[in-house]
Amino acid sequence: MAVDVDQVMANYRDTGNLKSRIGIYEYREPRFDPVDYAVGLLPGGLDGALVLDVGAGSGRYTKRLRADFPGATVVAIDQGRGMLAEVEAPAMVADARAVPYPDGAADLVLAMHMLYHVPEPAEAVAEFRRVLKPGGALLASTNARGDMAAMAELWERAAAPVLGPGGYSWHGAIRGFDSASAPALLEAGFDSVEAFEETGTVAVPEPGPILRFLASIQSFAGCDDASIAAILAAAERELARHFAAHATFDFQKTLVFYRCR
Ligand SMILES: C[S@@+](CC[C@H](N)C(=O)[O-])C[C@H]1O[C@@H](n2cnc3c(N)ncnc32)[C@H](O)[C@@H]1O
């Protein structure tokens, strides 16, 4: 499934959709904070370093790095102007494929859960290599192939009668940079690519967070208000049957982090 940049950026007009998706991970067991985990993977000695957080979104990594490494300059970069509204300067609107820094300027680039939104992720990886100093590091993250299968299947059952067989598949949407495709893309630009995988079960005790998650992908799916209402109504009926028999709706969540040098 080709990346449709207009649909992606419609989804990231502001931080609301992203927050609806992130909210569901409150129910993950064991509890897991990807920002804590990422900080644990960073090279030490960031005093005086230039760090570029590309696809920074609402800035959760930027804010944490600024707090933990006050001697570093952490720049938030995102293609969506509205995403950066909650991030203090330095922050800039730019495409990951054209980072506005000279060759060899940065010590560390972060690309957290964003490369699957780039139509040609190989171009972005090459751009990260270009702006990094020799010996600089890239930290990137994505989802495992087939991740969150129970949620994806719920969406597909609810959406198929509305959108037809060619409807939106979120596994398809991230295939360009998921755990199966990412290593080769990263190895093309970096000598060393280390992968760190973290799996947990998300056990959601009520339909609300699940329906908010599904609603948040409306613009990725490119569907109108009537279509998403019909999809959500079908999902709600299925969830009512599910919760009549089960205390929670469960799915597996697997994140993969890549440390590249
Ligand atoms: C899933 S969010 C991740 C946000 C943040 N990194 C995090 O993990 O919380 C993806 C972000 O990438 C941004 N994005 C998508 N395509 C981009 C591109 N080509 N260049 C820069 N940013 C992009 C979106 O606007 C969005 O803020």
Image (spheres, grey):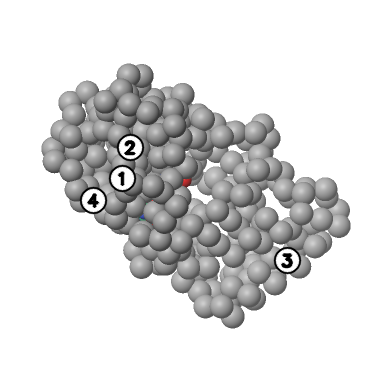
Residues at discs 3 and 4 in contact (Cβ within 8 Å)? no
| Along the viewing direction, whichever of 236 and 35 lies nearer the viewer | 35
Q: Kindly indicate whether the residue at mark 2 contacts the one at mark 4 (C-beta within 8 angstroms).
A: no
Image coords of residue 187 (percent x, y): 27, 33
> What amino acid type is highlighted by mark number 4?
Arg
Circle 2 Cα neighbour tier, 10 Å, few/some/many (<14 / 14–19 / ≥20):
many
Measuring from the top left, give residue 210's x and y in whole percent.
Answer: 67, 56
Q: CA distance from mark 3 to mark 1?
A: 42 Å
Disc 3 or disc 2, which is closer to the eye? 2
Callout 3 touching callout 1 (CB < 8 Å): no
**Mark 3 or mark 2: which comes first in sequence?**
2
Reading the image, the residue beneath label 2 is: 74
Q: From the image, state whether disc 4 or disc 1 is nearer to you.
A: 1
Q: How many marks?
A: 4
In the image, residue 169 above or below residue 199: below
- Using the numbered discs, state the Cα–Cα distance from disc 4 to disc 1 in whole angstroms: 19 Å
Q: CA distance from mark 2 to mark 1?
A: 7 Å
Image quadrant where residue 68 sits: top left
Taking depth in this image into account, of 169 and 32 the one nearest to the observer is 32
Q: Amino acid at mark 1?
A: Pro
Q: Earlier in the sequence, mark 4 or mark 1?
A: 1
Q: In the rendering, which numbered label is found on residue 90?
A: 1
Q: Which residue is mark 3?
A: 236
Please give the residue where the numbered disc 4 appears in the rendered image. Answer: 97
Q: Amino acid at mark 2?
A: Val
Secondary structure at badge 2 equals strand
Q: Nearer the viewer, mark 3 or mark 4?
A: 4
Secondary structure of the residue carrying tag 4 is loop
